[in-house]
Amino acid sequence: MMRKITTLAVCASLLLTACERPYDIKLADGMPQYTIDAFVNNSDSIQTIRITRSITFNADPNTIPGVEGAQVALIDSTDFRIHLFNDGGKGNYTFTPSRSSGDTFRVGHQYVLAVIIGSDTFISGSTMNPTAAVDSLSLVKEEDRLGLKAGQYVELNAVDLPGRGNCYWIKTFVNGTLRNKVTELNLAYDGAFSPNAGSDGIPFIVPIRYVALNDFQKPYKSGDRIRVEIHSVTPETLYFFAEVQQQLLNAGLFATIPANVKSNVFNLNTKSPVKANGFFCMSAVSSESIVIP
């Protein structure tokens, strides 16, 4: 019996070793596509829509080219106001809201994104839904324990809006820098994670209001400024982010074939081979900041 087990172990080892042989596969260059990153909110800060062109699979991701010379506009189809975005260079198109002139984005209004690049016209639509208000941010002092270092952490105090189906993207900024790793993406459906959680109108659950705001191996330092924003998003945007997470965390023995994440931006020129990636979403935003003592 021992000999049989040893023989099987050797065979398994050889098979596993064979699986590690490297192969060079030459990939053909595909048709370049545009990526339109259009997340716009109703704050008074400058709003930016970014347009880039796709690169080949093996290219340096730091060389993604910005698309210049496009025409970009947001059309408020509720009151028929057009907001033109200026070409700021390197693929960045900007708009500066002005409350005095009424050039702002409003909750409950429906918007159409229009992007013209050469003979291609890309469009998309989104409604700006209301967002939950940030009541306050609290400091939490933790002691050393398994998986957690002693120090100060931050907790969000906020309640989901009543009415099922509210979706949120909760952003945490540390000294002005967004925590933007894929594992730090903080999303909520009502007060929890899913439509079936029975979480309508409740305070956000602990993983959303506390765990996702902190790195428990790096407590905040005295003087750190923490800002938390709650952005309303459409349910379609929530599903888009779920696909993004799945693709970026797609690894290991049971990984699936990589694929482009579905976009809600479409080319009106149906005869054009050029497609668009990316997403368009209008968000209402509430925020609060705290400085670590």
Image (cartoon, rainbow, N blue to C red):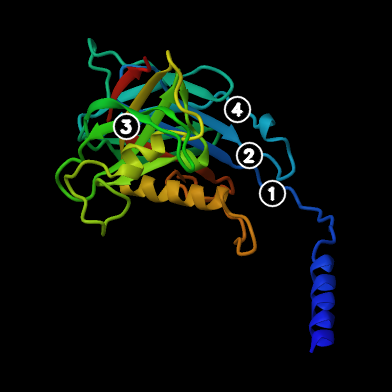
- Single out the mark in the foreground, 3 or 4: 3
State how far apart marks 2 and 1 are (Cα).
Answer: 9 Å
First in sequence: mark 4 vs mark 2: 2
Give the residue at x 42% y 46%: 264
Q: Which mark is residue 30?
A: 1
* SS at mark 3 in the image: strand
Read off the residue under disc 2: 54
Q: Are marks 2 and 1 in contact (CB under 8 Å)?
A: yes
Q: Are marks 4 and 1 in contact (CB under 8 Å)?
A: no
Give the residue at x 21% y 30%: 133
Read off the residue under disc 4: 66
Q: Is residue 106 visible?
A: no
- Single out the mark in the foreground, 1 or 3: 3
State how far apart marks 4 and 2 are (Cα).
Answer: 9 Å
Q: Which mark is residue 155?
A: 3
Query: Where the N terminus falls, by quadrant?
Result: bottom right
Outermost left residue: 162
Outermost bottom residue: 1
**Residue type beneath disc 3:** Glu
User: Quick check: 256 left or right of 114?
Assistant: right
User: Quick check: 76 left or right of 280?
Assistant: left
First in sequence: mark 2 vs mark 3: 2
First in sequence: mark 4 vs mark 1: 1
Give the residue at x 66% y 47%: 31
